Image (cartoon, rainbow, N blue to C red):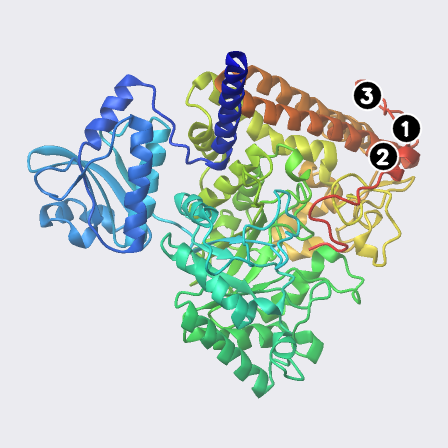
């Protein structure tokens, strides 16, 4: 009996320990681990000896609660809040208008630079005492400043003489959930939807609150709850009361709710015979529906609309155009302060023009015709969230219309949640790209933040990878993509390297022996996936529907531009899509400087070479090698880079828990196997055209091309028959 009790105790301890380790995954970058450095503990303890924090709104209460949660965990002692700002407090956290006049005067210059969501964190002397102040114009600024202070402490930053002034550079920093009402998630690889519609509105899952905390900690201030392939039912009263319950939670963290609006909703749930945007009854239906939503949710953000794209209904069904549709909804939202975000992801089955040109051609003539609360949302590239694309030519070309960036945080074309791919490196590449629309320095970031053309609304959206998996994102390192998106939406000029270091320190460890190699691994990971999937400008060669594995041979889909062969055009002469003046002339959609650059393969960056050019197999690359050898060696390089990632992670084992190590280690083995699959399948297929041997150093495929073609994945998560 004694031995049995001992065994039960051991099993219980092991089980409890395992659960505890898994719960660390749930906490994301808000673990607030105990600070081990003695000097830092003392420094931070001195700063937070007594904290003045005024009573007020739910936003202020949430900021105060975050301190009460975090500081005892990090410093090992309870937090003490003071009721006296001027005599006792070592840390004063208060809105600017509540500060004593002496402090207001000290911070005048800083507050001249702070917008309504910005904050300052400053060390100063007040009443002959060293203190630290967090202040802002608004309560939400206080919340953001509080999270930033805790983040600095997590990273063991020096706070004795801190002087930080920060404001978001983009107004609407939004997650787009592609969640369906049945809780499936389109292109979602981390479980089912967070939103349990059955239990709402009465049951508020703690996960909703923690989702809001995580978003607020990185400055995300808007969320679209439902799929762009919209279901009109979400606009009915039985769902709106559930949406209202979520909005009530999110409001305390500064997050506005948006909904996707199905254009045919007046017919499907309104009983009308048409959804024509110029029909008076249709216009009134949208006016009434909008008023109904705002009565429930006074801070409702507005509608995200996918129209006349991939079978979705839209104004073109009635002989109208995008302006007619968007402005009709914009007028309904205008008096309430809401926005219409109108997606530009359109391409027509009746248009045989190069798909990369179609959105630009369709939207550019409408520039300046949209109402001032309409934003056109554009994917970062002209095709569809590929591992690498040149920036979309609409960025910078639309001068009188606010244009939103749509990034994809979920890894639809990047190995789902089984591949370690640090996406802020991709985001940074796009944001730093120069459009040359107003000369050198006209970067995509300046288009998005509105500074290039003085646009009144600025938006950055990220298609969410968040599900109900315990770790939220499927792959632990995919959390860094959520984190990094938020940080870049706040400031699109941040470096992906800085963001990676922030995330690693908050999530894992501050040990430099861990940070340096793992950060290097993260920064290299996106280039690795480009190499083993789509090197040298190849794109959209994924297998049908699921977009998981290679399918460069697919040629049997009903539309030409749904087939990978449409994009690589491999034949015995060569490979690549000719988008120059001798081909589709897509290069003309860029500014003249870039048009000239992209028209010549010698001046086209080799990372985009086969995007813009169809070139012979023996074309000479800049390193003197033939195109065929260069493609083959890039595929091999991608595999080698994954091997390097495995080695790096093995060396990181002493700095993480066993659970953290094993989880990533197993996923890296999957990534290595699939990188080899990509290499072998693609090279065998392209070799059937090139008729050339693999160069030295490139491993021989382990299967035949026929075997690779036979592979099927009917249960791949997030699958649907058409691309989104």
Asked if the residue under mark 2 is in contact with the one under mark 3, i.e. CB atoms within 8 Å, the reply is no
Do the numbered discs 1 and 2 sit on residues whose CB atoms are within 8 Å?
A: yes
Judging depth in this view, the residue of 659 and 318 nearest the camera is 659
Residue 567: horizontal and vertical position, in percent?
Answer: 79, 48
> Tag 2 or tag 3, which sits nearer the N-term?
2
Q: Residues within 10 Å of mark 3 (few under 14, many from 20)?
A: some
Q: Pick the residue in front: 11 or 226.
A: 11
- x and y percent of residue 655 in the render? 48, 18
> Do residues under tags 1 and 3 come within 8 Å of each other at their CB atoms?
no
In the displayed structure, would residue 115 be above or below residue 640?
A: below
Residue 423 visible, this angle? yes
Q: Quadrant of the C terminus?
A: bottom right
Q: Position of residue 699 (x, y in %)?
A: 81, 21
1 or 3: mark nearer the eye: 3
Q: How far apart are marks 1 and 2 (CA)?
A: 9 Å
Label 3 secondary element: loop
Q: How many marks?
A: 3
The numbered mark at residue 692 is 1
User: Which residue matches tag 2?
Assistant: 617
Q: Which residue occupies 34% across, 26% down?
A: 156
Q: In this view, does 292 lie to the left or right of 547?
A: left
Describe the element under mark 1 as helix, strand or loop: loop
Q: Could you tell whether 334 is left or right of 109 in the image?
A: right
* Label of residue 699 in the image: 3
Determine the residue positioned at 83% across, 22% down.
Answer: 695
Mark 1 and mark 3 lie on one chain; the one further toward the N terminus is 1
Q: Is mark 2 on a helix, strand or loop?
A: loop
């Amino acid at each position: 009996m004694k031995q049995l009790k001992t065994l039960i105790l051991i099993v219980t301890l092991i089980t409890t320990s395992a659960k505890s380790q898994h719960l660390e995954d749930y906490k994301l970058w808000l673990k607030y681990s105990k600070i081990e450095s003695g000097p830092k503990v003392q420094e931070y303890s001195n700063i937070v000896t007594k904290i003045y924090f005024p009573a007020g709104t739910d936003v202020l209460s949430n900021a105060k609660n975050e301190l009460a949660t975090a500081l005892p965990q990090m410093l090992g002692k309870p937090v003490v809040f003071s009721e006296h700002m001027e005599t006792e407090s070592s840390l004063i956290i208060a809105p600017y208008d509540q500060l004593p006049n002496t402090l207001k005067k000290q911070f005048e210059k800083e507050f001249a630079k702070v917008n309504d969501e910005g904050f300052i964190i400053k060390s100063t002397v007040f009443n002959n005492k060293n203190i630290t102040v967090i202040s802002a114009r608004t309560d939400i600024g206080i919340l953001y400043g509080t999270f930033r202070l805790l983040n600095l402490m997590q990273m063991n930053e020096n706070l004795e003489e801190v002087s930080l002034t920060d404001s978001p550079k983009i107004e609407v920093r939004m997650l787009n959930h592609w969640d369906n009402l049945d809780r499936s998630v389109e292109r979602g690889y981390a479980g089912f939807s967070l939103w349990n519609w059955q239990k709402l509105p009465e049951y508020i899952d703690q996960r909703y609150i923690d989702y809001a905390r995580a978003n607020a900690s990185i400055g995300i201030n808007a969320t679209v709850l439902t799929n762009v392939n919209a279901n009109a039912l979400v606009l009915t009263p039985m769902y709106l009361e559930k949406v209202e319950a979520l909005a009530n939670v999110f409001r305390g963290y500064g997050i506005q709710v948006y909904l996707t609006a199905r254009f045919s909703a007046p017919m499907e749930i309104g009983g009308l015979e048409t959804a024509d945007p110029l029909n008076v009854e249709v216009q009134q239906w949208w006016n009434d529906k909008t008023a109904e939503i705002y009565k429930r949710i006074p801070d409702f953000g507005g509608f995200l609309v996918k129209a006349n794209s991939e079978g979705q209904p839209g104004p073109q069904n009635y002989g109208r155009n995008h302006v007619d549709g968007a402005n009709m909804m914009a007028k309904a939202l205008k008096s309430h302060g809401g926005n219409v975000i109108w997606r530009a992801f359109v391409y027509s089955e009746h248009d045989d023009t190069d798909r990369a040109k179609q959105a630009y051609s369709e939207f550019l003539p409408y520039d300046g015709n949209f109402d001032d609360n309409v934003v056109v949302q554009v994917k970062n590239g002209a095709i569809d969230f590929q591992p690498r694309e040149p920036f979309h030519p609409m960025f910078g070309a639309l001068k009188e219309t606010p244009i939103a960036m749509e990034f994809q945080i979920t890894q639809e074309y990047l190995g789902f949640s089984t591949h370690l791919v640090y996406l802020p490196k991709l985001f940074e590449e796009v944001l730093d790209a120069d459009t040359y629309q107003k000369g050198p320095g006209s970067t995509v970031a300046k288009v998005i933040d509105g500074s290039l053309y003085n646009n009144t609304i600025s938006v950055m959206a990220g298609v969410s990878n968040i599900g109900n998996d315990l770790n939220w994102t499927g792959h632990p390192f995919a959390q860094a993509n959520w984190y990094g998106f938020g940080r870049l939406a706040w400031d699109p000029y941040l470096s992906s390297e800085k963001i990676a270091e922030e995330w690693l320190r908050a999530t894992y460890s501050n040990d430099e022996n861990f940070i340096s190699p793992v950060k290097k691994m993260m920064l290299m990971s996106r280039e690795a996936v480009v190499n083993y999937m789509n090197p040298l400008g190849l794109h959209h060669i994924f297998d049908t529907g699921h977009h998981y594995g290679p399918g460069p041979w697919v040629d049997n889909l009903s539309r030409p531009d749904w087939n990978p062969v449409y994009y690589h055009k491999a034949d015995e002469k060569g490979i690549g899509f000719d988008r120059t003046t001798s081909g589709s002339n897509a290069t003309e959609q860029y500014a003249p400087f870039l048009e000239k650059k992209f028209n010549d393969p010698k001046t086209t960056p080799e990372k985009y070479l086969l995007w813009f050019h169809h070139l012979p197999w023996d074309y000479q690359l800049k390193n003197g090698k033939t195109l065929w050898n260069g493609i083959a060696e890039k595929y091999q390089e991608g595999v080698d880079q994954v091997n390097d990632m495995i080695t790096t992670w093995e060396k990181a084992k002493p700095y993480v828990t066993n659970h953290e190590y094993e989880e990533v280690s197993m996923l890296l083995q999957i990534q290595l196997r699939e990188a080899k699959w990509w290499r072998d399948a693609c090279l065998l297929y392209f070799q059937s055209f090139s008729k050339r041997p693999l160069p030295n150093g490139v491993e021989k495929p382990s299967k035949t091309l026929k075997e690779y073609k036979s592979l099927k994945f009917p249960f791949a998560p997030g699958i649907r028959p058409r691309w989104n």
